[in-house]
Image: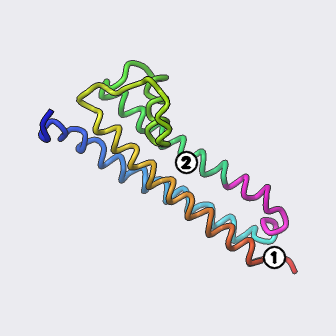
Amino acid sequence: MGAGAWGHDYLWGLPLVVLTVMFHVIGLSFIPRETRRNMPFICDYQVVSIGGVTVSITILHCVEVFAWAAVFLHLRAVDDKRAAVLYSLNAMTAYAHTTVQLDRQWQLMGALESLNGWILFGLSAAFLFVLIQRIWSGEGSRS
């Protein structure tokens, strides 16, 4: 398979990477608005608050997994919805524990999704780090 055969992977994969990163950043931008407004509560209930933020971030990741799965289905790179979601979640998380494979012509796109997952998880980790740092510094506490 020559480099020219990968053109479609990049044509579909790169815009999807950009769109999911933009979606992720927009989704994360809603969380600080709430944290600034509710920082005294967050400082008082740290574990519950971080849990709520983690659920919100997980929902963002799930939407992004489903977006990739929808594209794989559209391209007929996998046979069914379940396989598409399983493959997408596997690629996004670099879990590498599934027997689902993309059709040969779309395999580079799977690697692009994995790269996308690293970017998205990096953004999420950075976001959580800053939030925890703000909580532990006591910023916005009631005292």
Q: Amino acid at mark 1?
A: Ser
Q: Is residue 133 left or right of residue 77?
A: right
Across and down, in percent, residue 98 comes to: 47, 27
- For label 1, the SS is loop
Magenta stretch, main secondary structure class: helix
Give the mark nearer the N terminus: 2 vs 1: 2
Q: Residue furthest right?
A: 143
Closest to the observer: 32 or 93? 93
Q: Which residues are magenta?
A: 41-53
SS state under label 2: helix
What residue lies at 69% left-to-right and 73% top-to-bottom?
Answer: 134
Dot 2 alpha-carbon crowd within 10 angstroms: few under 14, some 14 to 19, many 20 or more: many
Q: Amino acid at mark 2?
A: Leu
Q: Residue at x 66, y 67 (%)?
A: 131
Residue at 42% x, 19% y is 80
Residue 50: name its quadrant: bottom right
Q: Is residue 31 left or right of residue 92?
A: right
Q: Is residue 47 magenta?
A: yes
Q: Is residue 116 above or below residue 86?
A: below
* Residue wearing tag 1: 141
